[in-house]
Image (cartoon, grey):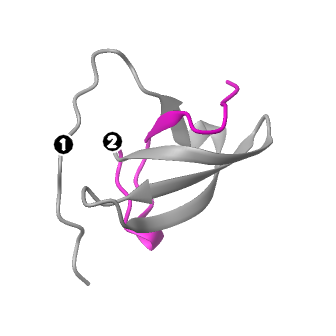
Amino acid sequence: MSFRELETVVMTSDLPTHGLKRGDAGTVVQVYTAQAVEVEFVTAAGSTRSVVTLGTDKVRPVDRNDLLTVRQPDVA
């Protein structure tokens, strides 16, 4: 699947090292290849939480039936 810069994407699996979970939404900020993108995840208040380079198998496009939710990050 190909993605475009500024496209909203959704995590398809957990990424605990970055505090991300399946279903978290982010924005593609850089497309490196057909298999790798950099995605920014922000808090509901607009602060950057994480910027991560991901394989395109770890994200999917937003579906028209997706609902956005808010969650508190896990505390270590």
Q: Dot 2: within a 10 Å radius of its alpha carbon, few (fewer than 14), some, or many (20 or more) residues?
A: some
Is 6 a magenta residue?
A: yes
Relative to residue 4, is residue 19 drawn left or right?
left
Magenta stretch encompasses residue 20 = yes
Which percent across, then down, holds residue 36?
Answer: 73, 46
- Which amino acid, mark 1? Thr
Query: Left or right: 32 with respect to 40?
Result: right
Tags 1 and 2 touching, CB below 8 Å: yes
Q: Residue 26 placed where, x, y %?
A: 45, 47
Q: Quadrant of residue 44?
A: bottom left
Of callouts 1 and 2, the N-terminal one: 2
Query: Can you tell which mark lies on residue 51?
Result: none
Q: Is residue 45 left or right of residue 48?
A: left
Q: Which region is colored magenta? A: 1-23
Q: Determine which of the numbered discs, if any, sits on residue 23 in the image.
A: 2
Label 1, label 2: how far apart the Cα atoms are = 9 Å
In the rendered image, which quarter contains the C terminus? bottom left
Badge number at residue 69: 1
Q: Position of residue 13 (x, y in %)?
A: 43, 46
Which residue shows up at 23% across the image and 71% down it? 74
The answer to which of 46 and 53 lies nearer the viewer is 46
Q: Residues within 10 Å of mark 1 (few under 14, many from 20)?
A: few
Q: Residue flagged by tag 2: what amino acid is it?
A: Gly
